[in-house]
Structures are given as C-alpha cells and as structure tokens.
C-alpha cells in the first residue's frame, strides 16, 4: 500500500481514498472525483497541470470544465486549504493548477511512526488528564473549598468579626477633639452619651472605623463621625441636631 505525507500534515491513502489529518487524528473519505484529483496532484508535485489534463484524467473528458473548478474547491476544503493563501493547491494563471506542498512516500511502518510522532498536544493532554482524572478531581475539589474558605473569611473580616484580634493603632487622646453638633437643650445626658460613644470606640479599637462625614447623619440617636479625611476632629451628632 502507498501512503503520501503532504506538508507533514496530511496522510493520503491512495488505495482507499482516505486522508488523515495527523495532528487532529481525523480521517475523511474522499469522493471518487476528489480521490482521483488528489492522486493526480501527489503524483506530479510542483508541476503545472492544465484544466484540460485534469478533465481527461479524472472524467475521461466527459464532463464540462466547470467540474474541474468545483472539484478543486471541494478538495481544498477537505485539505483545509485556501485559494487566497494556498498551502497545498495553487492556481497558476493561464496554466491550470499545481500542488505546492511537500510530498513524501510512506510505507506501513513509516505511517505508524508518523502518526505517533504527530500526536497533537491536545490529544496528549487529554490522555494525561484521563489517566489522572481521580487526582485532578480531588485537586479541583480542594481548590473550590479553598476559594470558598477565603471568600468566607474575607466576608467575616469586612463585617469586623476579627477586629478584636487585630492590633489597631489608636490615635492619642489629645488628637481627638470632639465637637458637639446640636443643642444640648435641657437634657445633659446627650453630652454624656457623646463621651460614652468616644470611650466605647477607644475601648473596642474601632476608632478608625468611624465614618467620615461632615453632614448630620439621619439617626435619631447620638452618633460619631470624623469631620474630614484627616481624622483629627470627631463630630458628635446629637439627636436634637437639625
């Protein structure tokens, strides 16, 4: 049996009319016309072949010349070729067509060696994954668990659940002047409430987590905010502030 290796990419079995894309391991059966046409080309690599010669060789001159162009188009498609940027069949103006690909003859043993040598990276990767599918599945589960754990820890951290464990730099007391926003009215407990809020923020190391806002917050209860981004002056907003 005779095999042709075309451009180190396609094996043509002249006896069966099959082509094998060695990188994809894909086999295709050629129709009679494309089979005869490809055999004509591989038997005459690099030689200009006229449309008339192709017509006589493939159809014994019993078909219209349009059949040549149609079969060339179909064969190019099967080879993965293009008329604009040909790698296999090139149109020769006023001359016909020529096979511009490299062609090598192979015997049975050379064919098997070529197919093994040109196994695609995707095929090798698929086989490697198939052999280790158990370990890969375990790794995937571990990765999913790790990501889920990190997401949970991040969410807990954002909600301040680890604040008591983390060292927090407190701003010295003398750097924390507090301005009372609102009228004390007759209830002096409001002032005491501001002092309590400040003392609680210091004791729980949450001073730096107080929001920065120069506006009166909508809460009805007394609350603390920083006057600006410098975080040097605290504002205590009393419930009576308008």
Image (spheres, helix red, strand yellow):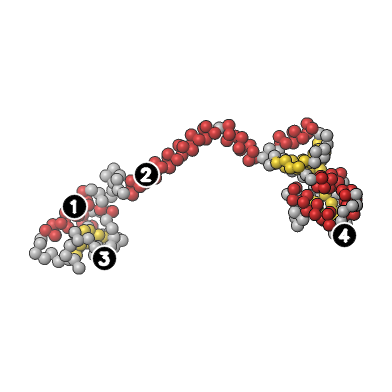
Q: Earlier in the sequence, mark 4 or mark 2?
A: 4
Q: Residue at x 58, y 31 (%)?
A: 131
| Residue mark closest to the camera, 4 vs 1 | 4
Q: Quadrant of residue 12?
A: top right
| Residue mark closest to the camera, 3 vs 1 | 3
Residues tagged 3 and 1 counted as in contact (Cβ below 8 A): no
**Alpha carbon separation for disc pair 3 and 4:** 85 Å
Q: Earlier in the sequence, mark 2 or mark 3?
A: 2
Identify the mark at residue 215; answer none if there is no mark: 3
For mark 4, what is the residue?
94
Q: Residue at x 41, y 42 (%)?
A: 148
Q: Residue at x 78, y 53 (%)?
A: 73
**Alpha carbon separation for disc pair 2 and 3:** 34 Å
**Alpha carbon separation for disc pair 4 and 2:** 73 Å
For mark 1, what is the residue?
199
Q: Position of residue 128 (x, y in %)?
A: 60, 34
Circle 3 crowding by C-alpha within 10 Å: few under 14, some 14–19, many from 20? few
**Alpha carbon separation for disc pair 4 and 1:** 97 Å
Circle 2 crowding by C-alpha within 10 Å: few under 14, some 14–19, many from 20? few
For mark 2, what is the residue?
152
Q: Earlier in the sequence, mark 3 or mark 4?
A: 4
């Amino acid at each position: 049996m005779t095999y042709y290796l075309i451009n180190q990419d396609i094996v043509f079995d002249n006896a069966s009319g099959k082509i094998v894309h060695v990188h994809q391991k894909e086999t295709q059966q050629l129709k009679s016309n494309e089979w005869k046409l490809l055999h004509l080309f591989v038997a005459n690599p690099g030689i200009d072949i006229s449309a008339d010669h192709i017509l006589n060789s493939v159809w014994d001159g019993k078909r219209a010349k349009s059949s040549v162009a149609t079969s060339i188009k179909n064969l190019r498609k099967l080879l993965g070729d293009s008329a604009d940027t040909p790698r296999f069949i090139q149109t020769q103006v006023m001359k016909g067509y020529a096979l511009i690909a490299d062609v090598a003859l192979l015997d049975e043993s050379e064919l098997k060696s070529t197919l093994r040598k040109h196994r695609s990276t995707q095929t090798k990767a698929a086989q490697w994954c198939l052999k280790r599918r158990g370990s890969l599945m375990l790794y995937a589960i571990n990765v999913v668990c790790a990501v889920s754990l990190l997401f949970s820890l991040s969410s807990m951290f954002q909600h301040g659940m680890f604040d008591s464990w983390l060292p927090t730099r407190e701003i010295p007391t003398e750097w924390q002047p507090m301005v009372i926003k609102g009228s004390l009215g007759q209830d002096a407990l409001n002032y005491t409430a501001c002092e309590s809020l400040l003392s609680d923020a210091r004791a729980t190391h949450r001073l730096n987590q107080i929001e920065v806002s120069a506006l009166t917050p909508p809460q009805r209860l007394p609350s603390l905010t920083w006057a600006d981004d410098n975080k040097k002056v605290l504002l205590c907003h009393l419930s009576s502030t308008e």
